[in-house]
Image (cartoon, helix red, strand yellow):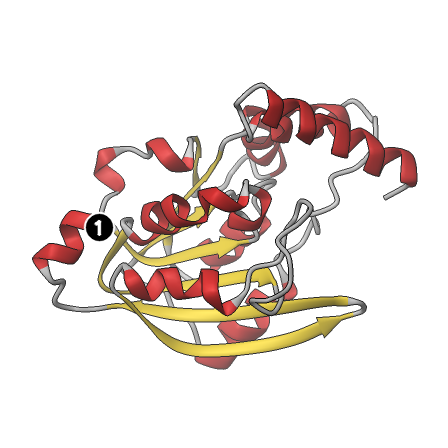
């Protein structure tokens, strides 16, 4: 991404936040890229490598199970999950991204939807055995981390699994920029809403520190925890 692209993105994010709609800039970035103006820095145009590495390690098999992809972008991770046998629902707040994904994969079995993480369909509550969250929380204002965590966890079935991929930082380091790196402090919010951490991996991709965390939702959810969600 060029310096001009970074400045344009920074200006779009600032404008969206100033207007009280911190997700509005996503669709603008996708629309610009679709018109040949700049690029989408988070779009690999292939499944996320750290996700695929983990899926191979745990022998992820979705036969007879439902999966949800949070902030699916152009659809590569969703397509990979479908190939693993999952019945996949994938959503993004950006209509341009969803339209683009459907064009890329016209015969896909994936159910691509335009949806807001904070206004998800009631039918998705507790509906999925596997949920993938790849760098969505860190693209929101830091004070949205708690409601975003609750919304994601609420889609999981008891016993369901969640994989979180994010940039990482130490708790004492400042939250700044978009994407802002998550610390173990923010990730602990998932445990506060009834999930159990199963594995934690840390990587360095060039100068970027990354975390990959797998969670399992408790098979028997405490009613008080369910109310909080």
Q: Residue at x 52, y 44 (%)?
A: 72
Q: Residues within 10 Å of mark 1 (few under 14, many from 20)?
A: some
Camera sees residue 161? no
Apparent side of residue 130 relative to residue 114 in the rendered image (left or right) = left
Q: Nearer the viewer, residue 201 or 52?
A: 201
Residue lying furthest top = 19
The percent position of residue 166, horizontal first and vertical second, equals 58, 60
Q: Quadrant of residue 182?
A: bottom right
Vertical order, 24 against 147 (above or below): above
Numbered marks: total: 1
Residue lying furthest right = 3
Q: Residue at x 58, y 19 (%)?
A: 19
Apparent side of residue 171 relative to residue 31 in the rendered image (left or right) = left
Vertical order, 154 against 84 (above or below): above
Q: Residue at x 53, y 47 (%)?
A: 136
Camera sees residue 17? yes
Residue lying furthest left = 223
Q: Nearer the viewer, residue 155 or 170?
A: 170
The percent position of residue 42, horizontal first and vertical second, equals 69, 47
The percent position of residue 227, horizontal first and vertical second, equals 14, 48
**Image quadrant occupied by the N terminus:** top right
Please, what secondary structure does the residue beneath circle 1 have? loop
Query: What residue sits right under mark 1 in the picture?
Result: 126
Q: Quadrant of residue 183?
A: bottom right
The percent position of residue 89, horizontal first and vertical second, equals 39, 43
Vertical order, 186 against 148 (above or below): below
Q: Residue at x 58, y 25 (%)?
A: 24
């Amino acid at each position: 991404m060029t310096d001009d692209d970074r400045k344009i993105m920074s200006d779009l994010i600032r404008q969206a936040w100033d207007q009280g709609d911190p997700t509005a800039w996503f669709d603008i970035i996708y629309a610009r890229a679709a018109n040949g103006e700049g690029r989408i820095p988070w779009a690999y145009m292939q499944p996320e490598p750290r996700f695929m590495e983990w899926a191979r390690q745990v022998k992820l098999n979705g036969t007879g199970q439902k999966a949800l992809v949070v902030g699916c972008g152009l659809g590569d991770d969703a397509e990979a999950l479908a190939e693993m046998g999952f019945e996949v629902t994938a959503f993004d707040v950006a209509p341009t991204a969803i339209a683009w994904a459907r064009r890329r994969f016209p015969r896909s079995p994936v159910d691509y939807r335009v949806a807001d993480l904070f206004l998800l369909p009631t039918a998705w509550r507790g509906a999925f055995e596997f949920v993938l969250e790849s760098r969505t929380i860190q693209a929101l204002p830091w004070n949205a981390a708690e409601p975003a965590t609750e919304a994601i966890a609420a889609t999981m079935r008891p016993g369901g699994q969640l994989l979180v991929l994010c940039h990482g930082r130490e708790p004492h380091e400042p939250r700044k920029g978009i994407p802002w790196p998550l610390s173990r402090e923010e990730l602990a919010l998932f445990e506060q809403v009834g999930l159990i951490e199963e594995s934690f991996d840390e990587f360095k991709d060039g100068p970027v520190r990354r975390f990959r965390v797998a969670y399992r939702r408790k098979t028997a959810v405490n009613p008080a925890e369910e109310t909080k969600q």
